[in-house]
Image (cartoon, rainbow, N blue to C red):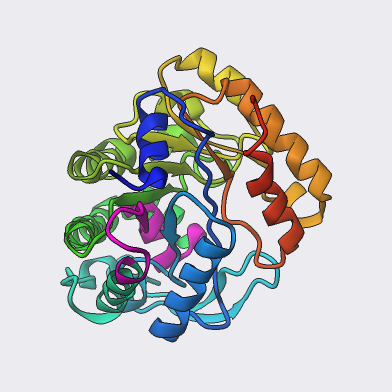
Amino acid sequence: MSDPRRSRIEAALSGERLDRVPIGFWQHFPTVDDDVDAFVRSTVAAFERYDLDFVKITPRMPGAILDWGVTLGTFHPHRGFYFPLTRGVVEPSDWRALQRVAPDRGSQATQIDALRKVRAAVGEDVPILMTLFSPAMAASFVAGDETFVRHLREAPADLRAGLNAIAQTTADFATACLQAGADGFLYGIKHASARVLPWDDYEPLEREYDRPLAGLVSAQSWFTIAHLHGQELAFDRFLDYPTQVLNWYDRVDGPQLDRARAKKPGGVFAGGLDHERTLLIGTPEEVALEVRDAIAQTQGRGFILAPGCTAPVSAPAENLRAMREAVETALR
């Protein structure tokens, strides 16, 4: 018999519902994530403490970004992500210097080591997702948003040379993660947000790089979530995205879950919790209210309860417990 966690996720993907909706959230561990064993212990401890239905591995910077010259400074005190100190691309010609990085080298090898250790700790059946940035999102971290956008408009051939190396490296890394025990990915897409880039500018990159890679990793995995990062989303452009699940800031910028369901009746969504306000500064009662409302909006089918983005490292433990406890009674 398969693990009930896996069975819940499988039921959600097929539009069914078992004893309750599945639940998961993810956080950074910025005080320990430079030590593989400490990072693994923290990741597994959070999974066990809150009795989640999947593990999502959140390294300080996923993939090969650190191998392309990015260095990190301090981390955000609430969100837990690191602020880049230096970038790997400054001039357009720097894109052409980016090399394809093998998954058994550099920071990617460290992340795969962590993945193997998490798999050994939680057992064979617990679903595990690795963080994966789309090629355009990874490129934005390598250069910074402002430089990325400027090079897209002023030096597109140079940028595409870099994107080719990034896409090849990311595809290799994804395959290696699946071989090391991952079930799928949380696939980050930053440029769905008009606050970063207008859709007309992003669409060629989405068509040439981000969507093909999403299709590739989804074809190799059974549980991959497309995370549409940010606000003012071109949401309708992603209704046919080739991943099994969509996740976005449904409480912050919309669309709300019920409206998304009307747009895509057979879609599978992950969300329902406001990571920017409710989890951080709300009360446990407010968290529980959002949980019940999210499950009611979806009738608990084709749905995984999750925050719209990374749960703050400073979120009160009682709010995280309230999220888990509320799924037990919703729609019963």
Q: Nearer the viewer, residue 5 or 73?
A: 5
In the rendered image, the vertical position of residue 95 relative to residue 168, given as above or below:
below
Q: Nearer the viewer, residue 56 or 285?
A: 285
Residue 253 placement, left or right of 96: right
Residue 274 placement, left or right of 229: right
| 137 within the magenta span | yes
Q: Residue at x 67, y 49 (%)?
A: 275
| Residue 294 figure quarter | top right
Q: How many marks?
A: 0
In the rendered image, the vertical position of residue 256 relative to residue 220, given as above or below:
above
> What is the x, y in percent for residue 174?
23, 57
Quadrant placement of the C terminus: top right
Quadrant placement of the N terminus: top left
Furthest-bottom residue in this view = 35
Q: Residue at x 29, y 38 (%)?
A: 211
| Residue 9 figure quarter | top left
Residue 314 placement, left or right of 75: right
In the rendered image, the vertical position of residue 113 relative to residue 156, given as above or below:
below
| 49 within the magenta span | no
Q: Residue at x 57, y 22 (%)?
A: 298
In the rendered image, the vertical position of residue 37 relative to residue 120, given as above or below:
below
Q: Residue at x 42, y 31 (%)?
A: 12
Furthest-front residue in this view = 1
> What is the x, y in percent for residue 296?
65, 23
> What is the x, y in percent for residue 61?
43, 70
Residue 311 placement, left or right of 109: right
Q: Is residue 290 visible?
A: yes
Q: Is residue 86 visible?
A: no
Q: Which residues are magenta?
A: 119-146
Q: Nearer the viewer, residue 295 or 20?
A: 20
